[in-house]
Amino acid sequence: MQQAQQAPADAKQTLPIGMRIANAMHKTGVAGLPRNYEIFYLALTGTNEQLKSELWESGNSLNQEALDKLHSKHCARADDEALVSKICDALDDKLGETIGMIKKEYGSVSSYGKVLVQATERLGPDTKLQPDMVDKMVGLLLNATKATEKQGQATLKGMQDTSTHLETMKTELEEYKRLAETDALTGLFNRRAFDLKLAELEKNGLQKAALLLGDIDKFKSLNDTYGHQFGDMVLRGVANIATANTREDIFVARVGGEEFAVIGENVSDEGMVLLAERLRIAIAENAFTDGRIKLSPAKVTISFGACHGGSASNGQEMYSGADEALYASKRSGRNKVTSFSDLNTSPDRKNLFLYRS
């Protein structure tokens, strides 16, 4: 990877921004992904000076993992916060409109009540009224009733319209939640969704749940040999295989660079190990290709570690157990499945966020 260098302030700066971005990405060997384009756009246009500085300082370490971290730090979060702010502002406006309509309706009903009180006082048992006076009072009550009914209909329509807007905003918030918990590359759940799921399991009880951690073997070597675009294709392929070989009630997430997590509920340790074996075999038997490069079966493999909730007192322990079992699979030759319950002695615990080769 060539070192990222800041473009000089010369005639090249007169090139269209799209060409400048394409040239910079090409010179630094950066894959032409939308999220990478966004990073270079913000840097080259001076929109985000901190991002610009961190991008140039990355130098030879400017790989896809570093770019994804920059995007997560400077782009995705800003987009999320802007969307949330926009929806919250709109929600506040609509609620304000609703409160205003209710107050207006209250004022109308209150005025109508006053008319009825006055009419009642004038139409007491001892009151003697001329026919023309009765006609006037009946007319007054009729007009007040019509006005109140009209106001009520207007309020009802306004509240119905507001309800529609609020439902739209609710849908937008649900879509934001989905996007915030989705891995952009593979379409699986992401680390944030995984952490929330693990916390939910811990709250509701881990005893009937099980966790798999899977890590693609020698993925760094694969990236270095065939390039990051091919590596991204492999990640998407593994995700598709995982989705195709699991039931809808099985939770599948990409939790790190080449690390995946699978959570099953109401499943035994043996059942989860069988699932891991099915995924391992399906991935090993697949011939990954991007149209230019085709790898024969067994060129891409994955190792798994499994831990049942019955072996852990909390979510972190279940994660650690699966992580230790995964490490055991790696240590004993890769392309294997190991259950934490089968480990005689626990190896030294590794950093939970360490990407293994």
Image: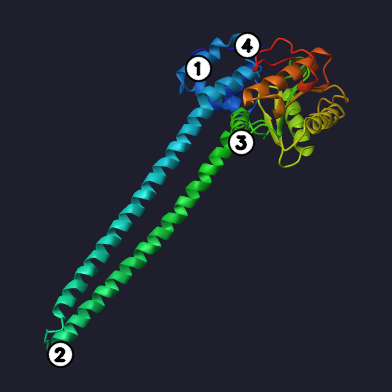
- 156 shown above or below 248: below
In front: mark 4 or mark 2? 2
| Residue at horizontal 34 percent and vertical 66 percent from the top | 152
Name the mark on residue 52: 1
- 305 shown above or below 101: above
Q: Which class describes the residues within 10 Å of circle 1: few (<14), some (14-19), or many (20+)?
A: many
Can see residue 136?
A: yes
How far, Cα to Cα, is label 3 from label 2? Answer: 75 Å
In front: mark 3 or mark 2? 3
Q: Earlier in the sequence, mark 3 or mark 2?
A: 2
In the picture provided, is 335 more to the left or to the right than 214?
A: right
Give the position of the N terminus as an image quadrant: top right
Q: Secondary structure at mark 1?
A: helix
Q: Secondary structure at mark 3?
A: helix
Can see residue 7?
A: no
Q: Which residue is mark 3?
A: 204
Q: Amino acid at mark 3?
A: Asn
Q: Which residue is mark 2?
A: 131
How far, Cα to Cα, is label 2 from label 1? Answer: 87 Å
In front: mark 2 or mark 1? 2
Viewer-closest of 33 and 80: 80
Percent x, y of residue 118: 16, 73
In front: mark 1 or mark 4? 4
How far, Cα to Cα, is label 3 from label 4? Answer: 42 Å
